[in-house]
Amino acid sequence: MKADQLSHTAAFVAIKFYGLTRIPSFRRMFDEQTITFYENLVQTLPGPLRYYHFWLKYRLIRKLYIWSEELLLPGDLLHILARKWYLQRMCDQLIAEGYKQVLVLGAGFDHLAHRYANMGLSCIEFDAPYMAEQKHSFYRNYYPDSKHPTICSAFLPEHRLEDLLRDHADIDPVKKTIVLAEGFFDYLEGGTIRDILQQLQASFKTPPALLSTHFALDELPVVHQWVFKSSVRMVGERLKFRASMNSFRQLLADNGYRITHSLDSRALAEDLKTNIDTKLPLLKGFYIFRAE
């Protein structure tokens, strides 16, 4: 993705979340503030993306959309709900453990920084310039009287994260800090990921807890690997980090992070289906983890 363009992958995560939470069983997984956040957000997307807000209100259109998505990449839709639900629960747990500051890398259109800012935590979002301005505008228009997270315009690796963390007045290097990196590392080279992990370790008195996701494309059937990579390429973006989960685990360990809790697609699907009634599969090769 370029610094001056919309992240279509982030936009479609928001659109899919919005469409799925029109369905009562999925809607019940989230509080109304989160539901409303994405309802408002999808309306602000550039046309024709914003038209999904209207069409996905209708059950027949939703069924057609779900059918087409599952035909091309089975499990993609349910993984959207899984990542939002589990990352929020994992972040809530860390906050209960005394963490007071949240950094969101490659925030896109995620809701968590807004959620935690309004719970009194210090929250900072880092994103490419165009996306940062889109988020600024969204908060001004829809949440003028709410607390907003600080939004830092940055484009990695051209900007060094270490410099941004050191120079930003709103970042306290002493506070226990959560770093949220949902889908962030997938679009970076391995060397850039290594540098970011090392800079996070060096920038805080206590190394931050890392909450992130990973797509292990090697666990997908070949045809679904092709669909996944092609769909990202079609919107002007490119997956750069295609490591297996074991390789990513080793990269984390080599740079000061040990995974303390991890859920793979099978564990996620089994747990989700104890909470919701759905026949949708969950995308193979998808992981959510906590590392410290």
Image: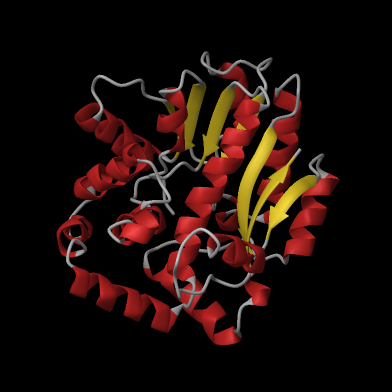
Can residue 273 be seen by looking at this rendering? yes
Q: Residue at x 38, y 44 (%)?
A: 109
Question: Image quadrant of residue 94?
Answer: top right
Quarter holding the N terminus is bottom left
Q: Residue at x 43, y 51 (%)?
A: 29
Where residue 270 appears, as percent x and y from the top left, is 61, 66
Left or right for 272, reference 32: right
Left or right for 241, reference 169: right
Can residue 153 be seen by looking at this rendering? no
Where residue 2 appears, as percent x and y from the top left, is 42, 51
Relative to the observer, which residue lies in front, 87 or 258? 87
Relative to the observer, which residue lies in front, 239 or 28? 28
Relative to the observer, which residue lies in front, 196 or 27? 27
- Determine whether 273 is above or below 69 in the image: above
Where residue 35 appears, as percent x and y from the top left, is 32, 45
Q: How is the image coloured?
A: secondary structure
